[in-house]
Amino acid sequence: PLARLSDKGELFSWGQGHNGRLGHGNQETKMSPALVQGLLGHVIVRAFAGWEHSVALTREGVLYAFGAGDHGALAQAWEEPATPARVCALGDDGACDVAAGAEHTLVRTRAADVVAFEWGLGSQPGARRAGHKMLPLHVFKAV
């Protein structure tokens, strides 16, 4: 998937849409940029497209994710939201930066911690599993 922000903080995405990774509520392929309607009303300041998921960060520090979450990249076990879903695993910390890789997401919180969401398979940073929940792994804890 590809993602781009407008000057107004609107998110546009395009590419192959399987697993809902474009955030348009379906799995359709988009050949040109299309507005992600589920984020209207939010000013998006950062957005990344991973291999099968995408993430978007609002000006207020709220993180949204969509697409394949089977490796924990969305911080929500085994869910595949086709529209943006709020990532609640950060608690009240809020985020100030985000990046997405193939099957993982890294977040810098407002408390300056760096957390990773991923199941810990392969070379990605890792996360830990508690029952059926994905919990953030603190890669760096601010002092």
Image (cartoon, rainbow, N blue to C red):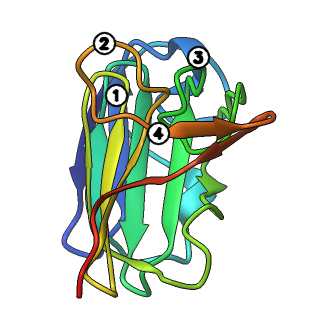
Instruction: Report, in whole angstroms, how far the alpha carbon at label 3 lies from the one at label 1.
Output: 13 Å
Q: Nearer the viewer, mark 4 or mark 3?
A: 4
User: Residue under circle 2?
Assistant: 122
Q: Amino acid at mark 3?
A: Asn
Q: Residues within 10 Å of mark 1 (few under 14, many from 20)?
A: many
Q: Say which residue appears at 22% left-offset and 48% top-offset.
A: 4
Sequence-wise first label, 1 or 4: 1
User: Residue under circle 4?
Assistant: 127
Circle on res. 14: 1
The picture places residue 31, in percent across and down from the top left corner, at: 32, 17
Q: Nearer the viewer, mark 1 or mark 4?
A: 4
Image quarter in which the C terminus is found: bottom left
Instruction: Report, in whole angstroms, how far the alpha carbon at label 3 lies from the one at label 2.
Output: 21 Å
The picture places residue 34, in percent across and down from the top left corner, at: 40, 39
Sequence-wise first label, 2 or 4: 2
Q: Secondary structure at mark 3?
A: helix
Q: In the rendered view, would you say 1 is above or below 28?
A: below
Q: Amino acid at mark 2?
A: Gly
